[in-house]
Amino acid sequence: MGSPRPHKEITSGMNSLAQLDLSLVKADLAKLGASGDDRDRMHCALLLQALRWRLSRAPSSAILSNTLTSYIRTDVLGVLHSEASHR
């Protein structure tokens, strides 16, 4: 059985945003955040701001919820990995 189809509103709204490979975003954030280079830290901050922008500019609450859920499911900020290393 396939996964449920998203609502038309979500699909049409997602088409207005560029698609992201969140696993690549997560890897870039980890690499840039671990760097001691100020330029890499600035790129990390800009990438985080872009992720926030996608949330704050969501055209509807359904799109916002879908975007936030995708961030959580992919653990784009590396929170789960960070929690495991502190145990």
Image: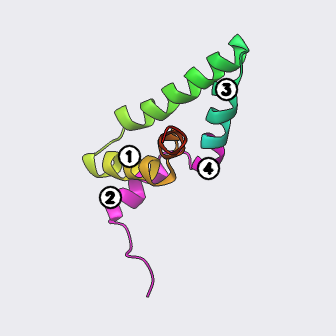
CB within 8 Å, label 4 to label 3 = no
- Which SS class for mark 4? helix
Q: What residue is shown with label 3?
A: 34
Mark-to-mark CA distance, 1 and 4 = 15 Å
Give the x, y percent position of residue 52: 43, 31
Give the amino acid type for the residue marked by disc 2 in the picture: Glu
Mark 2 vs mark 1: give the one in front: 1
- Secondary structure of the residue carrying numbered label 1: helix
Q: Residue 68 carries which label?
A: 1
First along the sequence among labels 3 and 1:
3
Q: What amino acid is found at the position of numbered circle 1 in the picture?
A: Leu
Q: Residue furthest top?
A: 38
Cα separation, mark 3 vs mark 2, equals 38 Å
Q: Where is residue 41 in the image (x, y as percent from the top left)?
A: 64, 18
Question: Residue at left 38%, top 46%?
Answer: 68
Q: Which residue lies furthest to the bottom in this view?
A: 1
Q: Which amino acid does label 4 sit on?
A: Ser
How far is disc 2 from disc 1 in space, using C-alphas?
16 Å
Q: How far apart are marks 4 and 2 (CA)?
A: 25 Å
